[in-house]
Image (cartoon, coloured by chain):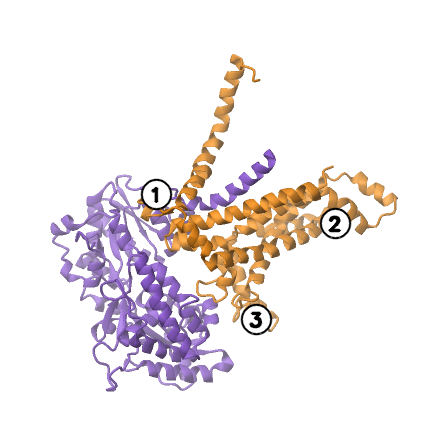
Amino acid sequence: MKKRLLAAMLAGTMVLSLAACGGGSSSSSGGSDASGGDAAPAASGDTLQVNIWDNNQLAGLQQIADEWSAESGIKVQINVVDWDNYWTLLEAGASGGQMPDVFWMHSNTAQMYMENDLLLPLDDYIAADDAIDLDNYYEGIVDLYNRDDNGVQYALPKDHDTIALLYNKAIFDKYGVDYPTDDWTWEDLRDAAAKITEAGAADGIYGYAINSSNNQDGWYNIIYDYGAQVITDDHKGTTIGSAEGKAGMEMLRQILEVSAPQTTVAETGTDSLFNSGLCAMITQGSWMINTFYTNENSANYAWAMLPYADVNGNGQCDAGERYSAYNGLGWAASASTANPDACYSLISYFCSEKGQKEQAQLGVTMGGMKGISEDFANAFEGMDVSAFVRAEEEGDLFFRPYTRNTTVWEDALQQNGAFLDAWLNPSDPAVMATACDNAQTIIENAIAAE
Amino acid sequence: MKKKMTLAEKREARWAYLFVAPTMIGLIVLNFYPIFNTVYQSFCKTGDFGKGNIFVGLANYQAVLSAGETWQSLWNTIKYALIEVPFGIVIALILAVLLNKKIGGRSIYRTIFFLPMVCAPAAVAMVWKWLYNTQFGLLNNVFHANISWISDPKIAWISIGIIGVWSIIGYNMVLFISGLQEIPGDYYEAASIDGASGLRQFFSITVPLLSPTTFFIVQTRIIGALTIFDLMFMVMDKTNVALPKVQSIVYLFYQYSFTNGNKGYGATIVMVLLAFIMILTWILQQVEKKAVYHA
């Protein structure tokens, strides 16, 4: 009997040690080791620990940070932790009181961190700082890091991003199809994709590829073009199931019919397909430029603005017919840092006009400050990335849809019971319409549960 | 009727406690505290960052037990175990018997079969993911096939199971070899003199005398297989159509606890798994009494 009990206990221990990571205050630090970043506890006095998740940006940001170090005499250690582990680690650090000093914030989680007073309030610093005037930044990003109930600013805009259409000229030449232009409608994209997919069937080449997870850099944009909103301006609802939303997704369904099948993009990924020369067009965010710029075939790659939806049928792109999603990271500091003044000084340096310009010129990202996008467009020698800048000058922008707990509905929308069904049955309009209704319900339920 | 300790015994006991203290403290901090915390959380609507938990009684259990995906995931996990445990054991046993004989290059083979255990599980999963890839995968290219190994809900669970078997064979094999070496050679000699064939010797001597080892492996592997997570997580994309038919119950736990930040719901899923494993362990203990041969 004793032995049996012991065995059961042991079994229990094995299962529950899994949940150890789930325990509120125990930390799961496996992630940091795996990615090489060591998020050591704050402030050994003269070194600031900075956490980011994008390795592409490390070199440029370290260069800017080093300049700040030369002025301030405080060293900056930037650690890269990959996206998934970044949030696991930051949350564990927040629960256990060991956050890095300065780090990136994102729209998916910002509200949660702000409401729990985990971030350093920046208002007093900003008021006393000549280099920072919040009016110079994109309003959506400033608002995002401003807490609703007390109006405190918790982060400064680091950057912003837009979406554009990437195409492979070699494939268009091979099948004699005209290159995409800024005057394309989504119908034009559909027709070109159909031609290439049909002609390229023997070679396994597709005209276009998009997965249900390509939301911000994909189908969200079509929904806004057609006049619906994934999340309404007050962040309390959605119009994804409206007639406009369904019209947009119906357009997408027609594109899906002539695109790479869902099982292919789920296994291989749209960017891998494109870089392997098996796909003529994909939509991509400006944060991905470097991946394609450094590819061996990049001479064949070119960018155009996202297509628009000619909703009023007058044959030209009017206001509100071409949308691009945009999002912006924020530089935030830990509320419990040992050296808040230095943290703010570093953030201010990154976000000042000088730091922002340098960030753009180094090709790190577009600025969070307005009016410096040209510097970024010129950063990639030999590749014209001005489509990302034109998207904001000639088209309209909408902020990446978010609520308090974005991931819950964002993940559900990509999966069975929502848009994955439609991706798998692109020939059936009814499935897509049902998916829109389901998406409406999913988002409403998720918001109600927040 | 306890005897009172003498002074010397007391002093000795003090030292004993001191020596087991590091282990005990480790267990308490890393295992026991999280266990009770998990049980507590399963009764709560958990707040952000471990703050502001609200006691909700059995609401989480109601939600978890009435969700179809819980049972589907549990069934997926069982299906995975049904592949990994028997095949992993039978193949390992055959290999162990073969590699226990005096054959040339024995240690090289042992090393090769054990290699998957040494590799990082994430790396193993990434390699298999590309082997299975429908478009570029080695498997489809070699066999000139067009099979969606990991996207077809009908076969994806088998594909994942095969990775599991491949990964665990070496470990099981080493345990079996050590078990085999405990069996005295006299039995085989006597059997040979009596004219028993190799196959007869295997089933009449090796299998029964190895049963304690086999049972140990069965029990630990069942628990290991029921807590599988990394294979599904690494090999299958979130938008993989076969995922609902393959994702394990721990995958579901990860999804709720870490991706969605709903720790209370996640803790409840783990409690369901715990109950399931407890029942299974109890059944196994009953089987052990009957099936295992204790010399």
Marks 3 and 2 in Cβ contact (< 8 Å)? no
In the rendered image, the vertical position of residue B183 relative to residue A393, given as above or below? above
Hue used for the chain lettered B: orange
User: Residue A89, image x and y in percent?
Assistant: 36, 48
| Between marks 1 and 2 in the image, the one whose residue lies nearer the viewer | 1
Chain for colour purple: A
Label 2 sits on residue:
B103
Residue for badge 1: A40
Q: CA distance from mark 3 to mark 2?
A: 39 Å
Q: Earlier in the sequence, mark 3 or mark 2?
A: 2
Q: Which secondary structure lies at badge 2?
A: loop
Q: Position of residue A59 (x, y in %)?
A: 32, 56
Q: Which mark is residue B147?
A: 3
> Regarding mark 3 in the picture, which secondary structure is present there?
loop
Residue type, numbered disc 3: Ile
What subunit carries mark 1?
A
Which type of secondary structure does the marked residue at label 1 adopt?
loop
Residue A378 makes an appearance in the image:
no
**Could you give the CA–CA distance between mark 1 and mark 2, rounded to whole angstroms?**
52 Å
